[in-house]
Amino acid sequence: MTKLFLCPVHATLRQARVPSARRPWTRGSLLALALLTSGASAYTGKPGDPLYRLARSQGTTVAEWVRLNRLPSTELNVEQALQLPGEAPAEPPVAAQAGPLVGLTVVAPTTLRMGDAFVLRLRGSGAAQARVRFPSEVGEDVRRPNEPLRPVAFGNEFVVLGRVVLGKSTPLVYDIEVGGEHLRGKVEVDPLPQPLQRLNLPASLSSKLQDPARQAEEAAMERAYLRRTPQAWFRPFQPAVNVRWQSTAFGQPRIYVVGGPVQYHYGIDYPALAGTAVTAMNDGTVVLVGQFPVRGGLVVLDHGAGVSSLYFHQGKLLVREGERVRRGQKIGEVGTTGLSTGPHLHLEVRVRGEATDPAEWFNRLWPR
């Protein structure tokens, strides 16, 4: 086992190695991999390549490689092209739909995955007047299901930001209305192929989940999630810490205590030395800052258009509520506060209160 380190609530405690089935890993192949990973944006699998060594060479996890490349398992195929962690993902297939609405063309992803953020692209004379809902959210564990949304101007088109809640397995349905006429579309949703973690937290740690101050902590978070303000960013999002290694990938299902429910890891954990700078992913307004029982030293930024970024477990907080911050501005320092056993940053990006994969926002103005 490759033992990992960080907080029991947000971290992977152990990561299973994937054994080589056909060929031992040689010094020459390690050198070749080092040369590839130093400048290339993709790696082509070869017979017997063990995925865990690729993860270790990139300073990330097997789960992150599986998630990033949408692998059905940890087995690699011959000549399989893999996207390297930290690189901007390739654009996915999209489908253009010119339906019964006059003056409107809709471009939507052909497939999605649990935890994805995405955009519907609206083009034509009717795009600015469109109202968009996601009726498949009704009955799901989401905030404000089927909320009516106005498109945002982006270049020569309009976009509507969507999210796929973790745990969703049924198709996503969108409904677009222009002048009383409706166009409805459907997108299939794929699962995240990650193993279930059983953390079995000791009472000394799990007791923090029952802290009386938790109620106020959760109420403050809900107020932040319900904000609806105009888009405040006009540059791509960037990583919050200068660290590539991830100790826990986004969307990992886990059970915290024996007999407890399955829950998801709503962000990415980045281990770093205490005092490492934490910077704003993009322009926004500080809507919550303080020390909390579970999230520890917390900053929440509202970027507008329903997008917020969250920074947990900080040891030092350098901003105040109501302050406007700029992309790349230092907002705090890595620490080990709250429910944490070692210094790291837990980073989240939420769309209208629901968790999406932070890595899919890096180097992008909008998700795919």
Image (spheres, grey):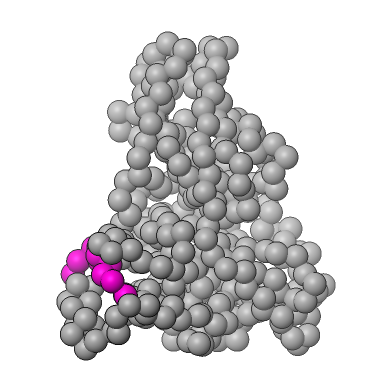
The percent coordinates of residue 144 (x first, y second) are 68, 40
**276 is within the stretch colored magenta:** no
* Rendered residue at 21%/88% (across/down): 27
Is 268 placed left or right of 96 in the picture?
right
Q: How many marks?
A: 0
Residue that lies at the very extreme toward the front in this rendered image: 22
Residue sitting at x 28%, y 71%: 47
| Nearer to the camera, 124 or 224 | 124
Left or right of residue 20: residue 142: right
Q: Quadrant of the C terminus?
A: top left
Which is more toward the observer, 170 or 103?
170
Residue 322 seen from this side: no
Question: Is residue 45 in the magenta section?
Answer: yes
| Image quarter of residue 136 | top right
Image height of 188 relative to 99, above or below: below
**Residue 205 at x, y = what percent?**
72, 83
> Is residue 139 something one can see in this rendering?
yes
Residue drawn at (62%, 48%), measured in percent from left and top?
Answer: 168
- Give residue 6's position: percent from left, percent from top: 55, 82
- Residue pictured at 22% horizontal, 77% vertical: 33
Q: Residue 175's x, y, as percent?
A: 56, 26
* Residue range of the region highlighted in magenta in the rendering: 38-49
Q: Nearer the viewer, residue 225 or 94?
A: 94
